Each structure stands twice: as C-alpha cells, then as structure tokens.
Image (tube, coloured by chain):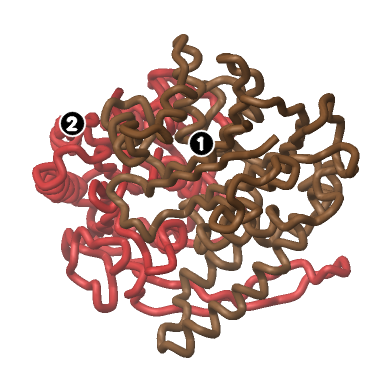
Chain colours: A brown, B red
Amino acid sequence: MRASIATYYLHKGGCAAEEYEDAFAVCPELSQAGVPDVAKVRLAIADGASESVLAGAWARLLGKHFTLNVPGVFEQPLTFARHTVSATESFESALYDYVAERAAHGRPLRWYEQRKLDRGAYATLLAVGFFNPYEGDVLAPTDDRGWTAAAIGDSGFFQVRDGRLLVAFPMVRSAEFSTSPGLLNSRNRDVHLVAQHVRMRAGDVRPHDDIYLCTDAVAAWFLAEAERGGHPWKILNDLRSEGGPHFTDLITEERAAGRMRNDDATLIHVAVR
Amino acid sequence: MPYSAEISRSNPTCFVFLVDQSASMGDPIGGEVQSIKAAVVSDAINRLLTELSVKCAKEEGVRDYFHVAVIGYGHTSVGSAFGGTLRGLDLVPLSQIADNPARVDERVKKVPDGAGGIVETTKSFPVWMDPIYNGGTPMREALELARGLVDKWITEHPACFPPIVLNLTDGESTDGDPTEAAAAIRALASSDGDALLFNLHVSDAGGSAVTFPDDVEGLPDSYARTLFEMSSPLPPHMRTYAEQEGFKVSDDTRGFVYNADIVSVVQFLDIGTRATDLR
C-alpha cells in the first residue's frame, strides 16, 4: 500500500502570514518521497498556543521531533512521554540561541518577554506512525498495516473508510472543543505527568482509506459537518482534484459563514492506495 | 450572542480603572496584612498591568488587544493616575504601557529554599501608579470622565468587545449622586453588548466580604445597595470563571464586591478583566 500525502495550511484571518503558529511535518519529506510505502510514514501536527511566546517555534520543533523514525516512540504512553521530554531539551538549546541572537542584533529580550519565556511555550501535539507489524514497533494492529496515534490536546485524527467516518480521535464530538485544550509545555520535564495526559489509539489501514490530521478549527468543523449528516471528507478530498476548491478559499468561506472558527488552519490528508 | 466578540489587534477593547484617592484610602485595609488601602489598590493595579503585558507579549512585542486608562479621583483632581512618561494620558495602548513603567522597583519576596526553609529573594516590580490619598471622593465626576472615554472608544470601535470600567473605592461620593453617571456608562453599547461597570468597595474595618452578590440581601446599608445597583451583571464567561473560582453565581450576579480585603481586590480585578477570546 502506498500513501499519497497532501498538506494545507492557512494563517488566521486578520493576522500576518508569518504569525501562523501551527506546524506540520511529514516523513519521508514530501519533496523526496514520491508516493511512499504507507508503513514508512510518520506524521505530526501541532498547534502553538497563541498566548505563549515562541509557540510557533515550539510547534515546529515538536513536528520535526515526532516524525524522526525513532524506534519505540509509539509503544506506550511512557515511551512517548520520554520523547516529548527530549524535545523540551532540544527547545531549551534553541531558546538559548534565540536569546543570544536577539542580543547580538541589539534587540535584547524585554522584561515581559523574559517573564513569558520563563513560563515556557505551549502547543498541542498529534503524532501518527504507520507500521508493518512484521517489523515490530506497534501497539496492536489488526491487519497487515496499522497506525498508532498519540495526542495531547485537541488536534484531530479522522479515518474514513467506505464513505463513512470510522475513527475520530481524540475528540469525537464538535461540542468537546473549548478554549482551554490540553497543551504540552516546553519546560515540562515530568515524564509521568505527560504520560498521564497523552491519549493513544491504534488501528488498521486498508487500501482506499483516507486519513486526515488537522488542528482544532478544521477538526471541529469536520465533526460538526459530520454531525449534520454531511460528508466533510468529500469536501477535503476535492482539494486535490483538478478544478476543486483551493484550501484558502474553502477556509475563508467557512469562516465567513460562521461554520469554522477564525484560527490557524492546518490539514494533512493521506490517501491510502 | 453578546459578549462574544473576538478581541484582536484590529478589534481591541478597553479597560478603564477608576481609583479612589480620597484621604480615607490612607487608612489600613481590613484583614491580616498591615497595609493601607491605597497601597493595596495601587499594588493590585500595577500587578494587573504587569500580568496583562506578559499575557499579550509575543516575539515582536506586546500586542495591543487592550487599551487601558487608570483614572484617579481625590481632592486635587480627577485624571490620569499614570506616572512617568505616561503621565497625563488616559487610554493608552497596552504595548506603550508595557514599555513605559514609571519605574521598576525591586521587592523582597520570601520563597522556599527547597530544603524546608525560606530564603529572601528580590523580584522586579514594574510600577505605573503610586498610592495617593487626600481630600474628598469625586466619584460622580470620575464616572462622567469614564463615560466620555467609553463613548469615544465605542464610536471608534463599534464592534468591539464591550469596554469595562472598574471602580475601586472605599467611601461615598462627595460630589453628588453617582447613580446617574453610572447608568450613563451602562447605557453605552457596542454591537457586542452594553458597556460594563463593576464596583469594588475596599474594607477598612474587617468583617467578611460580600463577593459577586445577585441581590441586595446581605448588604448592610443603602450605600452598599447603591453600589450594587450601579454594577452591571457579570457576562456569562466571567460568571463561569467566578464559579470555577468557587463563588456561587446566578444569571443576576453583579460585578460588585463589598468590604473587600486584599484577596478579594485581586479576585475582583482578575475576574472583571477576564477576556474571552484573544486572537
């Protein structure tokens, strides 16, 4: 089975493009991968909390960190949590460079930035690994290919099979979304605390499945559309088709109609073929 | 739905703090801590401005989600209570507030030393306003000034999250009945709802605080009832937050605290400035 992967993103309305603070990462990188074997794919999506400083940088680091092919990361909450703590150590080092660079450019941190940095950066995280069970490293796949997803916060994973929504994870209803989702703090070194909060789920993959990872605004919209009896996956699949809508137009229209919250919007679509 | 407007740099909102600077604010506050009322209130506002600055700080600086005025009212005048380079200004964008404290004090703080003991450490404390206390309580004039600021703000920002006026006082108005001026503030509205006026009465004699009441029962005198009637109901998101903080609330809960000690001054400012949705 091969994975045809497409990614889309748009910053929140009224903000500059460089203020986009979601992040996504795909391994193998799309530019190099062609259409990779699904079992070799790692995906991550993260939503930097806009109330923290350097949230976008933290989200990007998490995305990269969780698409490295590190054995055992998805085995259990504790192994996943250990990997998040190693991400916090990498971020601390990047932060040191950032502070030095600001000082070197005559823009040392102001008192309020320093206080905010002391509180750490926050982001949600959803990481997904696909596996071949005969190569190990999997929770409990039931078919010849499987996936494992790990989530902190409200970024969404959806799997559609035979025209119906098979899996919604970790949120299953649009009403579950709030303004205070679970977040991963860049200074949190408490492995057991992270392990307590991470949610994991595994499943199988079959040809013609479609899998979507999205940050909260798109995820809440997706579930609300499905609850109304709609087929949001068809709308998202159309983004790939010739003559189909552009992601920017779709999101702008849904925001304007009040069907989607005005927030950074990010989507990874995996078409399994 | 009212009180749901997004607060953003292109659609900011404003806070107007009215601070009683009459002579009686120099008396000790009720409760265990030995401090005068004026110092407790100015400390609480300086702390709030610090927190707001940090909350809205991003890599490029502080985002102007809020414009803030701090108006003092006492014997000499009704006007800006800012010191330093902001002296004399009324509504100031938060980024300018963050970059221009009048000074930064070093305050001694006792913290656990990690080995069961306590050590003293210093922490920087930005100061925008100092405690001042003399003369009477021209509350009516202060409310009228706030009404003018809010009116102008709403004209310029018609779709904003409704402006919030927070009045902190310890005594009765000495320049006439304040209720009409208070009603004039509450009568102003953006497309997202009526402007909000919250009142806090600072205690000087101890006794228990009446926090976020929903009727006049339990209020000791006509003065307390007047302040209650002057206060807006808490909007839903603030009610929810107050409930999470352990207060009993209903649809009629007012943004009003009577006989406040230090803790309830801080709670009043925290709940009364709680934003819904910053973008």
Amino acid type of the residue that numbered disc 1 sits on in the rendered structure: Asp
Please say if A264 is above or below B54. Answer: above
Q: Callout 1: 10 Å neighbours few (<14), some, many (20+)?
A: many
Please say if B108 is above or below A227. Answer: below
Please say if A112 is above or below B140. Answer: below
Q: Out of B180 and A6, give the one closest to the viewer.
A: A6
Q: Out of B28 and B199, give the one closest to the viewer.
A: B199
The location of residue A251, given as percent across then percent down, is 35, 35
Residue pointed to by mark 1: A216
Q: Are marks 1 and 2 on the same chain?
A: no
Residue pointed to by mark 2: B191
Q: Splitting the image into 4 quarters, where does residue A37 fall?
A: top right
In the rendering, which numbered label is found on residue B126?
none
The location of residue B115, given as percent across then percent down, is 88, 69
The location of residue A139, given as percent across then percent down, is 86, 35
Residue B216 at least partly seen: yes
Q: Chain of mark 2?
A: B
Name the quadrant of the N terminus of chain A.
top right
**In the figure, is residue A130 to the left or right of A144?**
left
Q: Out of A95 and A273, give the one closest to the viewer.
A: A273
Residue at image location 53% in from the left, 72% down from the top? A114
Q: Out of B238 and A244, give the one closest to the viewer.
A: A244
Instruction: Give the number of callouts.
Output: 2
